[in-house]
């Protein structure tokens, strides 16, 4: 008597269990049985497809979701999970589209009974491609802006060095010195831009490290003003006020210098005449700390533009700078546990406030 070999069981996905789990996912999820009949559609998939689950469940997945490649080829015909390789367990995320032009990022998973067993179920994970497309466009715009910012000083360096190399004897000592000073300034600009870009990368990846210590507020503010005075600014154009209770600020010394340098440079660039630096105690929902405020008497920033001020490569009406200063300011302050904002200055112009929490008790 021949011994019968039991058939290998086929995997199936219980409808209720699949539906309950699928509703917890942020992505769209569609499940189909071994014949390709849709058995489950989560709410996110309904939103993305603009169709109710009742219109999809019970129908062939190839008909209700006729996925195509960018070339218009049928994705189902190309992959064929029913007659294709039995060792295939799915497909990595791929950008596909529907006949109406809707683009989706699709990941496929094939459930099989054992290794190279028959197909038991199909799971499709759907993601909105618009978010990915926006991220790619932002990335391309970032690269384009960086290239532009780098090219300008490099062009100056290349132009002056080439001219000096070819025509050194034709220039006077004063002319040579002027060109060398321009090269030095462009080199400093490049160094500043590269440093800013590295800091942006650290902020974005959460790798910006700080070492907080109590620092004398008055001395730090005065030192930054002295730098601008030494560069040719009038000392009378700067006002420093340190209120009682704000004599010390708890922060990383180098990063605080970076914040104040960016804020003061921004204020000087946009002022009409004067710049005011103020430090005062402040307490809010997150606890006590010190509020640093740097204000100018320029034209100010319209309310509708203030959200963009702290974004990458933002330039005000006067232009200049790398456009990364306030983005770095906000990133550094937030790493300290504080926050930054921009508002109208009391006497006109704009004020940027940066809150640094007090030392933990």
Image: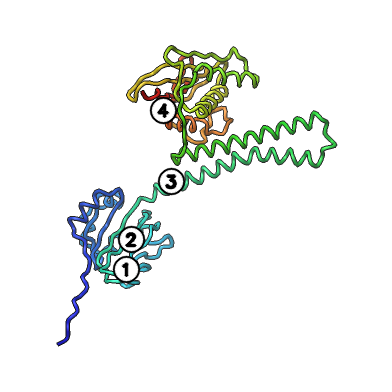
The quadrant where residue 54 appears: bottom left
Residue 179 sits above or below residue 269 on the image:
below
Spatial CA span between label 3 and label 1:
32 Å
Q: Which mark is residue 81?
A: 1
1 and 2 marks in contact (CB < 8 Å): yes
Residue 327 visible in the snapshot: yes
Asked which secondary structure carries label 2, the reply is strand
Give the number of the mark in front: 3 or 4: 4
Instruction: Pick the residue in front: 216 or 23.
Output: 216
Asked which secondary structure carries label 4, the reply is strand
Residue highlighted by disc 2: 108
2 and 4 marks in contact (CB < 8 Å): no
Q: Residues within 10 Å of mark 2 (few under 14, many from 20)?
A: some
Q: Residue furthest right?
A: 169
Spatial CA span between label 3 and label 2:
24 Å
Residue highlighted by disc 4: 339
Give the number of the mark in front: 2 or 4: 4
Give the number of the mark in front: 3 or 1: 1
């Amino acid at each position: 008597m021949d011994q019968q070999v039991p058939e290998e069981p086929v995997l199936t996905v219980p409808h209720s269990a699949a539906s309950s789990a699928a509703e917890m996912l942020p992505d769209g999820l569609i499940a189909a049985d071994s014949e390709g009949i849709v058995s489950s559609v989560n709410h996110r998939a309904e939103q993305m497809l603009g169709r109710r689950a009742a219109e999809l469940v019970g129908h062939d997945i190839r008909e209700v979701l006729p996925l195509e490649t960018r070339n218009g080829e049928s994705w189902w015909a190309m992959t064929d999970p029913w007659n294709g390789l039995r060792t295939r367990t799915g497909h990595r995320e791929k950008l596909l589209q529907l006949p109406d032009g809707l683009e989706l990022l699709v990941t496929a998973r094939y459930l099989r009974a054992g290794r190279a067993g028959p197909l038991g179920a199909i799971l499709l994970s759907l993601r909105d491609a618009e978010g990915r497309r926006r991220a790619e466009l932002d990335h391309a715009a970032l690269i384009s802006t960086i290239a532009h910012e780098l090219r300008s000083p490099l062009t100056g360096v290349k132009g002056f060095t080439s001219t000096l190399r070819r025509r050194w004897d034709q220039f006077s000592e004063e002319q040579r010195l002027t060109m060398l000073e321009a090269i030095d300034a462009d080199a400093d600009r490049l160094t500043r831009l590269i440093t800013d870009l590295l800091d942006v990368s650290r902020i974005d990846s959460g790798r910006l490290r700080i070492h907080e210590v109590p620092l004398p507020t008055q001395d730090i503010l005065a030192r930054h003003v002295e730098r601008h005075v030494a560069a040719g600014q009038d000392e009378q154009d700067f006002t420093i006020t340190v209120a009682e209770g704000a004599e010390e600020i708890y922060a990383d010394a180098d990063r605080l210098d970076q914040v104040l340098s960016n804020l003061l440079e921004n204020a000087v660039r946009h002022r009409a005449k004067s710049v005011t630096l103020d430090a005062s105690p402040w307490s809010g929902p997150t606890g006590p700390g010190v509020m640093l405020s740097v204000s100018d008497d320029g034209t100010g920033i319209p309310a509708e533009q203030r959200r963009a001020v702290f974004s990458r490569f933002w330039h005000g009406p006067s232009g200049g700078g790398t456009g990364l200063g306030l983005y770095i300011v906000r990133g550094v302050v937030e790493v300290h546990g504080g926050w930054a904002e921009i508002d109208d200055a009391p006497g006109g112009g704009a004020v940027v406030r940066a809150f640094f929490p007090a030392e933990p008790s």
